Every structure is written in structure tokens, then in C-alpha cells.
Image (spheres, rainbow, N blue to C red):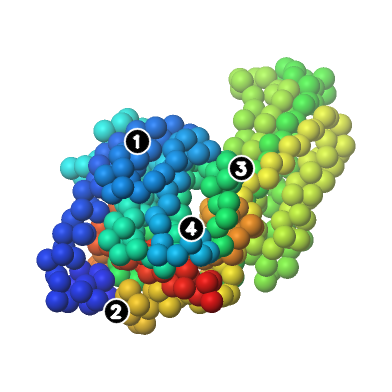
Amino acid sequence: MVSLEPPGSHRNSGNAGAETGFLDRLISLRRELHRHPELSEQEERTAGLICSFLEDLGISHRAGVGGYGVVAQVDGRNSGPVVALRADIDALPIGEETGLPFASATDDVMHACGHDGHTAMLMGAAILLRERPPPNPVRLLFQPAEERGTGARRMIAEEAIEGVSAIFGGHLDVNHPVGALVVTEGVVNSASDYFTIYIKGKMGHGARPHEAVDAVVVGSSLVSALQTVVSREVNPADPAVLTVGSFNAGSAENVIAGSAILTGTIRTLDPEVRRHLCDSVVRMATAAGRLYGCGVDTEVREGNPPVINAPAMTELARRAAVEVVGRTNVLRMRTPNMGSEDFGRYLERIPGCYIRYGGLTAGSDPSPAHSSRFDFDERALAVGARWLDTVARLAAQELAR
Ligand code: NI
């Protein structure tokens, strides 16, 4: 379904050299970012690179927004409604095993989610917007700390989207071929919440259980009980996940553990299901404490809201995608992604659309995001940059009507 010519080139068939030059520039920016990944809330060098890039282009910007965030604005021909484009810039605590010549130079830190690509795409959009001024101003958000879920919230608190009427962004996806853009209306990413359960039993001798309250037994029973929340309490038509990700207890084979700590995550699409799952964790943990006669404390922490694409903005995103890759390369997600994404924080305040950029090389066997061998087809960079540029122009026009 994807043509093997450089993606986006059908628009510039008379100008293939310039197109190749543009892609090459984005590839070298991406590789520079990839080689020097930085964890959430530590993106100092990355932000410096972005700032000097923007300075070279003569684009005004503000650094240090919500941590190491950078907010830039490209002037438009008019001062009408401002459209924002967002890329996340942080990396993950993973040791890279791709063997690529531009692999991470930092031990145990890797751009394993493609945020280096997103950053290069937004830089590409900056080049295009600067070359040909958009109808109205375009705000560029280079957002830190997406992986930790704190970046969007902090940038919003520091007025990054003040005066913005609509926002667009996207994520690389190696489940879809390079040259494809995946545009889907409604919920595209789940909400995420986190819980920690502290079980306080009574430590004792492994041979004399009657003198102790065994936190391992209480915890095990609770882990099993929690599996019935999604399977027995939630409408099967409503997607939901409850995972206990860690269970720490005990110190020796002949000692009854006096305490245990369980942590986990909840992923949901519907606000009511979300509330139900959070409440159920507390209810079951409290009940387990009562059942076995021990103390149980539960903490539920709110993560990201779901990412919900507004219908009108999705339509604009789709029109822009058709313009960039042609109708047959514009796809739709079959099911929402149960991973979370803090782009939803912007969409709680302003309408917008979050899409997926196909990044799969035809015939290859891709490693998933958040794995040590993750990589994507770099031709996606020019496709993403052109889509960002196009959707900003289209939205500026439509919103000014
Ligand atoms: Ni990501």
C-alpha cells in the first residue's frame, strides 16, 4: 500500500533534490538527538540543541518552560487564532541494543519511544513554516517529561498554551507502514492511574504461623481478587486493564513476611469505568485487611487523562493527512491504544487531534516501542514534518473563518 518513493515526494515530484535535502537534514537532526538521549526532567542538552536550531532560523522562543520545555512561535501573516504543534523530547531508562552507528552514547538511556523523531519532525515543521509564513501564528511546543507524565501539566501551568485555539501532535508507530498517517476520531489513548498498596501484617518464625500475620498470603489473595475487577465488574464492551506490576515482600525462606508492598496501574477509556476501577482497588485492599486481620493502606494516584480527538479537529487532521500522503495512505486505528500519553492534558483545555505516524519499513520485523532494539523508518520524519506544517495552516484558516 505504501509506495517506495520517499514519502511526501508526490507533492514535490519536480523538486526531488530539495525533498531529499529536507529529509537528510531531518535525519541528521534526529540522529544527533538519538545519540544524546536524556531522561524526563533532565533534557538540558536537548533543549539547548532545540534553542540554537530556533535561533538559527530566527524564530522567537522561550526556554525553561515547565522544566526543560521550549515554546516557540512562528509569526503568521495575520495575528488571528494561534494553532499549537507539540513534540515530546525525552528518552527512557533503557540500555540501547540496536547496534546503530548513531546509537545512544549514554549508558542505560535511550530514545526507545521515538521522541527523537517527534522532535526532528517539529523542527522540520519549523523550517517549512519559516520558509512560507502561515496565515496565523503557529506555536511550537517542545515538551519535556512525557514519559513521566509531568511535562504537559507543567508546561500548561507555565502558560505554554495561553491564547492557543487548537493543538495537534502525533506519535511514531511501527505497527503501521512508513508513509501512512493514522487519524482517528474520539478516544485514541487510555487514561492511566497508579496504585500502591501497603500491607502491614506481623513478622514471625516460618514454623509458627499462628504467632504471625503473613503479608505474603494477604498480598497473594489480594492480587487474585484484583483480577476479578475487570473480568467481573466491568462491562466487557468497555476496555479496561488492571495490572499489578510489582509485589515486594519477605526477606528469608524461614521468616514470615510482616509487610508487603504492591504497585500497579489502571488503564481505562471511560471516566465512569475509571472511577469504578480506582474505587475497587481501595475496596478490595481494605476488605483483604479486614478478612485477614491486618492493616492495609492504599494510595491511588491520578495519571494522565485519556486522549480524546475532537471531531472537527480530526477532520482537519485527516484533510491535512490526505494532502500529504494521499487518501489510500490515511489509516484509522482499529482499537484505542491502552498506553497513556500526556497530550490528553492539552485536549482537556483546547480541542485538537493526536495522530500516529507510520514508521515501519515494509517487510521488516519491528521491535516495539519501549524496547532496547526499537527503531523506525526515518522517511517518516519528512512525512510528519509536512503533516504538522499542513495541519497548522489548515487549522489557522478554518479557525479564522
Ligand atoms: Ni512515546
The residue that label 4 is drawn on is 84
N-terminal label among 4 and 1: 1
* Lower sequence index among marks 2 and 4: 2
Which residue is rendered at x = 34% and y = 35% of the image? 48
100 displayed left or right of 365: left
In the foreground, 54 or 110: 54
What's the distance in space between the residues labelled 2 and 1, CA to CA? Answer: 39 Å
- What is the crowding at mark 3: few (fewer than 14 residues within 10 Å), some, or many (at least 20)? few
- Cβ atoms under marks 1 and 3 closer than 8 Å: no
x and y, in percent, of residue 329 in the image: 35, 77
- Which residue corresponds to mark 3? 157
Q: CA distance from mark 4 to mark 1?
A: 21 Å
- Earlier-in-chain disc, 1 versus 3: 1
**Residue bearing mark 2:** 1
2 vs 1, front mark:
1
Q: Residues within 10 Å of mark 2 (few under 14, many from 20)?
A: few
- Between circles 2 and 3, the one closer to the viewer is 3
Asked if 328 appears above or below 176 in the picture, the reply is below
State the separation of the CA atoms marked 3 and 4: 16 Å
Query: In which image quadrant can residue 85 be found?
Result: bottom left
* Residue at 39% across, 32% down: 44
Residue 48 is marked as 1
Q: CA distance from mark 2 to mark 4?
A: 31 Å
Q: Amino acid at mark 4?
A: Ala
| Helix, strand or loop status at disc 2 | loop
Residue 167 placement, left or right of 37: right
State yes or no: discs 2 and 4 in contact (Cβ < 8 Å): no
C-alpha gap between disc 1 and disc 3: 22 Å
Q: Is mark 3 within 8 Å of ligand 1?
A: no
